[in-house]
Image (cartoon, rainbow, N blue to C red):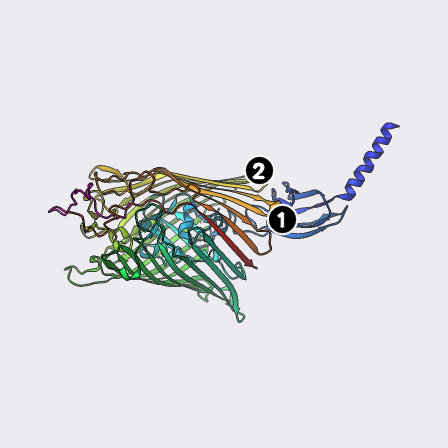
Amino acid sequence: MIKIIFFACSILSFGIISAQNSTISGTVSSKDGSEAYVNIYLKGTEVGTASNENGQYTLKNIPSGKYTLIASTIGFERFYQTITIVEGENQIVNISLSPSTESLDEMVVTGTLKPVSRLESPVPVEVYKPTFFKKNPTASIFEALQNVNGVRPQINCNVCNTGDIHINGLEGPYTLVLIDGMPIVSGLGTVYGLSGIPNSLIEQIEVVKGPASTLYGSEAVGGLINIITKNNLSAPDFFADSFVTSWGEFNLDVGTKFNIGKKTNVLLGVNYFKFDNPIDNNGDNFTDLTLQDRISVFQKWNFVRKNSRILSLAGRFFYEDRWGGEMQWSPEFRGGDEIYGESIYTRRWEVLGKYQLPVEEQLMLSFSYNDHKQNSVYGNVPYLADQRIGFTQLTWDKTIGKHSLLTGTALRYNYYDDNTPATLNANGNANQPDEVLIPSIFVQDEIAFNKKHSLLLGGRYDYDDRHGNIFTPRGAYRFKFTDNDIIRLNAGTGFRVVNLFTEDHAALTGSRDVIIAEELKPERSFNVNLNYLKKIYGDNGTFVSLDASVFYTNFQNVIIPDYDTNPNQIIYDNLNGTSISKGVSANVDVSFYNGLKFMLGGTIQNVSNTEDGVKERQILTESYSANWSVGYDIRTWNLNIDYTGNLYGPMRLPTLGESDPRSDFSPVWSIQNIQFTYDGLKNFEFYGGVKNLLDWTPNRGNPFIIARANDPFDKEVTFDTNGNAVATPNNPNGLTFDPSYVYGPNQGIRTFFGLRYTLN
């Protein structure tokens, strides 16, 4: 009897509990069928699960109330649905997922000049979304790239803080920057091309490491950075994003989209950045951070045509006034020799577009044009430069059986003029701007033998009046031995035609004389890259991605500034030998069901130059680096925590000879950041945190960073008959003014706070 009573009570209790709690169940699917291991949870609660191998799920013991049901997984847009739960009710909610641009299987275009799934591309392409850069918000993409493995923003001047992008240890001029696939950025404007595009207008950033001159021509020697902007469908109706820092920096991004009639839609974005607070924490009487006042306006027009043919037109205007120098500098001292300052006025505009021809074949006409004017003074040395680059390209995309063909022709127009000896005529007595037309043709064939094997072959022919015929072939092989394991082998060549003074501010700043040893020849490179991609799906919803590469690049005719032969000179010459960059790189991304995500990347590299049998490590190149990002989503608090950082190994630095007390090598250094983001209010995000948590600056362990900062015009330096500085009581080390000793930012620890508003 007791057992029967106990059993009856148990049944009754179970019925009461069941009546008080409810369940939600259903199936998760996409256009490809059921989706396994999808994370499903109720926002603001600890109720959650993962779909099983058949896409089925059940959420149990849900108290009555109103909830937001969320489903998320790598490769698909997040699913949201408002659910009202009544006691004892069992609801069926079938979830349909849409493909996401956040996935490993997103479409990429940079590697092959045509849209292709990243997993199917024979060329390895790294993809970064705006959410990646939101983990450590910055005022420009240039700064944000510090968290990309194997990519390092290099500041080239302690005073003006201009810089370039290093990929796998290669100097900035070897990196080609594109917007929507068009090479609109030149060496003169690399840092400007990566500034001023609002984050919310960026669809994704694609990075290709290794030569791509077969498709993109000159400058694509070391790698590509392609900034792809949103279309009207994916962009928000309105957005605003603004932050301030404790140093006094202010950044604002605003944008919107609107229609003009029934067939025209427009994206508009404006970026404004201002920093006007001179700071000298290292006590050398020079600004630690360049003061800047810049504005950028970006607009993109898309037109609706018959048969969904493409017609788009985009433009950008950029203006910046930046200066750095002695703390007492003001504009009236510009260009004089009383108070030292480096002042740069930049005005740049760009236009680019695509037009699909109204024929049955896939014919696409693309074009871009940019005009860059720079009015600069470095102390009392003026640098006035004008550069224009026009580019047009016609491509034909055709699939015949197993062959996916892409052929095209391109024409590039280069114009460059400045007030330096670089544009003097052969006799050196008259100005002669550099103006050249470079026609080219290229062909590419991707052969899909079957689902596992594909081979890409390509070649490009360019003709340059100055250098004659240039041929750049490449090949790529992809072996997909399972759906989650892919190996890619790439080999190719690259070339670069040099405009020396557009790329190296060290040639203009400081007191070193610039020596050009002879007529500079175009640089050439050969690269081999072996890449392995592995995806792992855990039963509990955990996702792991491993992306590893081995790379080797051999350069011929490489141009390297020689700081060593004579400490008072920078000598530019083609290397009489070879320059080699080799190493390994790996990225690991892990995403857990409980909201924890982390990314770890590392690169070990050896970049060296061999001339006349003597091998030497390349200057300003780290031997190893690491990047990481750890994020945790506390769902009950609507709070995200992001911890990001990077670490760089020692690099050889440009000192002024044996008597220079500054270290010949940088120490191991790291910049780390933490951010807290609250998104509990509809359409709003509040974020804040601390940058450079360790308060690291390069003056640590050095007596000074800028040599002779107290005498920037060398008025108190004594020179011998050969022009070399000699030791004197007020100059015991025999140094001259030199701000080129720079390898990291001088900006120390600071807090920041920001607000985002998005209306969809």
The mark nearer the N terminus, 1 or 2, is 1
> Residue reaching furthest bottom?
261
Residue at 52% over, 55% down:
755
Q: Is residue 737 magenta?
A: yes
**157 vs 601, nearest the viewer:** 157
Q: Amino acid at mark 1?
A: Ile
Image location of residue 575, percent across then percent down:
23, 45
Is residue 415 visible from the viewing direction of this image?
A: no
Tell me the magenta residue range.
Answer: 719-742
> Residue reaching furthest left?
721
Q: Which residue is mark 1?
A: 70
Side of 171 relative to 259 (left or right): left
Quadrant in the rendering for residue 367: bottom left
Q: Is the stretch drawn in magenta largely helix, strand or loop?
A: loop
Helix, strand or loop status at disc 2: loop
Q: CA distance from mark 1 to mark 2?
A: 20 Å
- Whether pointer 1 and pointer 2 mark residues with C-beta atoms closer than 8 Å, the reply is no
Side of 360 relative to 497 (left or right): right
**403 vs 130, nearest the viewer:** 130
Quadrant in the rendering for residue 192: bottom left
**4 vs 112, nearest the viewer:** 4
Depicted 86 relative to depicted 3: above or below: below
> Residue reaching furthest top?
2
Q: Is residue 592 magenta?
A: no
Image location of residue 500, percent across then percent down:
25, 54
Q: Which residue is mark 2?
A: 538
Image location of residue 509, percent across then percent down:
25, 52
Depicted 228 relative to depicted 258: above or below: above
